Image (spheres, grey):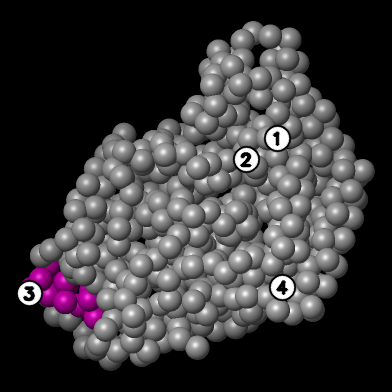
Amino acid sequence: MRTLIPVLVAALAAPSVVRAEQNPKLDALVKRYLDGLFKAKPHLATFMGDHRFDGALPDVTPVGTKKREAELVKQQKELQAIVKAGGLADDDRADAQILGDGIALELLYLREIRDWEWDPRLYDSFPYYDPREIVGQRLSDIIHGDFAPDAERKKSVLAQLVALPKFLAAEQAALLHPKGKRHTPKIYLDQALKGHPGVLEFFESEVKPFAGDSPQYAKAFLALQKYGQFLEKELAPHADGDWRLGAELFAKKFPLALQTQMTPADLMGRARAAFAGYRQELYAVSSKLHGKLWPRDPLPGANAAPADQQRVIQRVVDELAKEHARPDQLVAAHAKNLDDLRDFITQKDLVSLPPRDTLKVEPMPEFKRGSSAAEYLAPGVLLRNASWHATYYVDPIDPSWPPDKVESYLRGQNDYQVQLVAAHEAYPGHHTQYFHSKQNLNPLRAVLWNAAMVEGWAVYGEGLMVSNGWGGERNDRFKVFDLVGLMISSANAILDIELQSGHMSDEEAVRFMVEDGFQPKAQAEKKLIRAKLDSTQLCQYFLGLDEIQTLEKDYRAQVGAEFKQKTFNEALIGHGSIAVRLLRGYLLKK
């Protein structure tokens, strides 16, 4: 959800973003494609800031999905003819590749993945929707939006309430009689049942006051209640499907969802090598801290056996992790360092920042809780409004957890880790990049954004803070958790590939995260759920970081002593959130 921005750079820096005149045939195709995409996925249109379809819900009937497939096949052939004719400028060639991947990915979903037939959570797992719930979250965005007067937004909410019973009926039919023959996995049903009461509560507490106690509301709420009963009574006996995408289908989704030329095997090799390298660095930093924390205790040498190194690292991590917020203060802990992060970035001249009042930190809505610790959402990237804001959501402690699980989770969300998460989500991470992407919009790049580049930038931003001295005298402590975070990023890719391909069991995954990756058990168990619910997403962090680091190395070699971190950073995020392989053509001299 990031877009195009002019970048003013020095002569030896990356070329500025001055777009050549667009090929008229490609321009027309892009506009028709986006219109069709938004009609097929009106929830995506709402999130992106195109509010023409706010009253509609997706058509998941066989007729609707076949119609969309035919549209995409026609557009795919048209794009192939445009590319074959040649003569495209650099920007158009990049956009053609982005469009081609987007069309191919949606066709893969329609023909083979078919998630509406086995995922009862009312989610869209299409990667450009990042994936999220499409009923409660979308209505919340409309109800609390400032893009139109209350009366206009109320009209959209009422129209969506009218459409909801038909949409839920189509979902139920698809779930009970999947054309793709894949049954609902139990973990998806469990998550749907866990989140459904939160959707009902949201309807009663927010939708009803906004829309009024109307016939439209009553029918929609009844349909939601019946959907919950359907999940419990009719779908549950059939929820015996495999949550794994499978090696073959994962390999098809991988290059399209991540917009990469790497294969899963390529990324796996790089991730395993990086994991081992980060672990060696972590041992070195941990040894240094161990000497300060326990100066009288002997330390094994640099070439100590892995088990001895493990004990040193684990002791240091466990000691530092004791510093964490109280359970009821976790959300506030994420918010309290934002001003200090901004001041540090400005002092070090790392990147231009968005206005302070454009970001708020809030507890994650109940219907979204349980799979990730934090999430950044910025609806409306296509809106050309001067006033905009985004939300950094934090998943609060689950009140049903026993004390030992609460403590385990808070150790994973310790004071050091929370500050690095804030750097990832806010400054200089996602929120900063979104700010740059709000300028000079390229709608195609805004909608078909590259998640690997987005997440890679956020991880890269964490490292920038630590390498520039964040934490002052306590910088080594942040280095420990930055390196643990880098190990997590590389472990994420390994887990995603191995689990979805059927090469790793649940027990092996948790052991790997806890014993090899120094993650608390509660955090590892939550990550396992996330890995099962979202294929290819966990690969994004390491893939994007690895590609950005390689690009930076090549860029430094090209500009030499003229390298300036801020110039590189703003050139990197100044072309929209496009794949790093495409960014290389902009930042490196030809």
Q: Quadrant of residue 170?
A: top right
Disc number for residue 296:
3
Q: Are marks 2 and 1 in contact (CB under 8 Å)?
A: yes
Work out how far the residue at label 1 is from the one at label 4, CA to CA, in angstroms. Answer: 33 Å
Dot in front, 3 or 1 = 1
Instruction: Quickly name the residue at label 2.
Output: 50
Q: Is residue 253 magenta?
A: no
Q: Quadrant of residue 121?
A: top right
Work out how far the residue at label 2 is from the one at label 4, CA to CA, in angstroms. Answer: 32 Å
Number of marks present in the image shown? 4
Residue at x 40% of width, y 77% of height: 14
Judged left or right of residue 412, residue 74 is right
| Res 151 visible | yes
Q: Position of residue 204 (x, y in %)?
A: 58, 16
Which of the pair 10/154 is nearer the observer?
10
The amino acid pointed to by label 1 is Phe
In magenta, the rendered stretch is: 282-295
Query: Would you call the spot at circle 4 few (<14 residues within 10 Å), some (14-19), or many (20 or more)?
Result: some
Q: Is residue 284 magenta?
A: yes
The amino acid pointed to by label 2 is Asp
The amino acid pointed to by label 4 is Ala
First of labels 2, 3 by sequence position? 2
Q: Quadrant of residue 39?
A: top right
Work out how far the residue at label 4 is from the one at label 3, CA to CA, in angstroms. Answer: 52 Å
Residue at x 89% of width, y 48% of height: 67
| Res 247 visible | no
The amino acid pointed to by label 3 is Arg
Instruction: Quickly name the residue at label 4.
Output: 251
Q: Secondary structure at mark 4?
A: helix
First of labels 1, 4 by sequence position? 1
Query: Would you call the spot at circle 3 few (<14 residues within 10 Å), some (14-19), or many (20 or more)?
Result: few
